[in-house]
Image (spheres, rainbow, N blue to C red):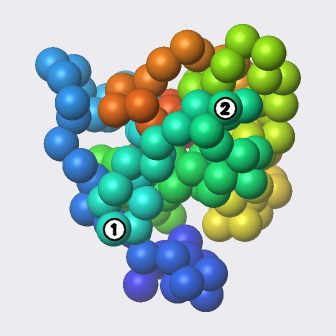
Amino acid sequence: MSQVENRLSELGIEIPEPPRPLGNFAPYLIDGDYLYISGQISVDVAGNIQRGKLGQSATIEQGVEAARHCAIGLLARAKAALGDLDRVEKLLKLGAFVNAVPEFADHPKVVNGASDFMVEVFGSEVAEHVRFAVGSSSLPGNAMVEIEAVFRISAT
């Protein structure tokens, strides 16, 4: 078992099989030393979409949990792409969309659910990243959050 998978086990996290894409696009793309992962919506461990609109039908705490589930989905895609999560050398970027009412202003707090999870798994040196966190009037399946990622990876 890889070091990253050992850490996930310590955290009580099981990486699920990644779902099929909801459209005509690649779920991930490897280009040289970079792994690009398409947006992952908030899906819980039972495979249910975590739905809702922040500032209306969903709380910040629920949004944080939804963002954490997006991060787990990103790792599921990374594992499918790489076979071994130890190939991740650096998380470079997270791009996050938060399903929110126009007045909602706590997008960064919500997306911290994903950022904090990545630090828990990889440690701060590997997981320190840039990101954006913006509001959206809707997301696929009325998901609370959708997050994409870019990683630098090793050859083997």
Per the rendering, the mark at residue 127 is none
Residue 6 at least partly seen:
no
Residue displayed at 51% across by 76% down: 13
Residue displayed at 67% across by 32% down: 56
Q: Where the N terminus falls, by quadrant?
A: bottom left
Q: Position of residue 59 (x, y in %)?
A: 72, 46
Q: Position of residue 31 (x, y in %)?
A: 37, 26
In the figure, is residue 50 to the left or right of 77? right
Q: Where the C terminus falls, by quadrant?
A: bottom left
Residue 55 at least partly seen:
yes
Residue displayed at 76% across by 45% down: 60
Q: Nearer the viewer, residue 146 or 38?
A: 146
In the figure, is residue 5 to the left or right of 80? right
Q: Nearer the viewer, residue 37 or 60?
A: 60
Tag 2 and tag 1, C-beta contact below 8 Å: no
Q: Nearer the viewer, residue 86 or 119?
A: 119
**Residue most extreme to the front:** 56
- The residue that disc 1 covers is 46
In the figure, is residue 15 to the left or right of 5? left
Distance between the alpha carbons at the discs numbered 2 and 1: 24 Å
Residue displayed at 72% across by 12% down: 102
Q: Which amino acid, mark 1?
A: Ala
Which quadrant of the view contains residue 55? top right
Q: Position of residue 89 (x, y in %)?
A: 60, 50
Q: Earlier in the sequence, mark 2 or mark 1?
A: 1
Element at label 1: loop
| Disc 2 versus disc 1: nearer the observer | 2
Per the rendering, the mark at residue 56 is 2
Say above or below: 109 vs 45: above
Q: Which amino acid, mark 2?
A: Gln
Badge 2: how crowded within 10 Å, few (<14), some, or many (20+)?
A: few
Q: Nearer the viewer, residue 120 or 107?
A: 107
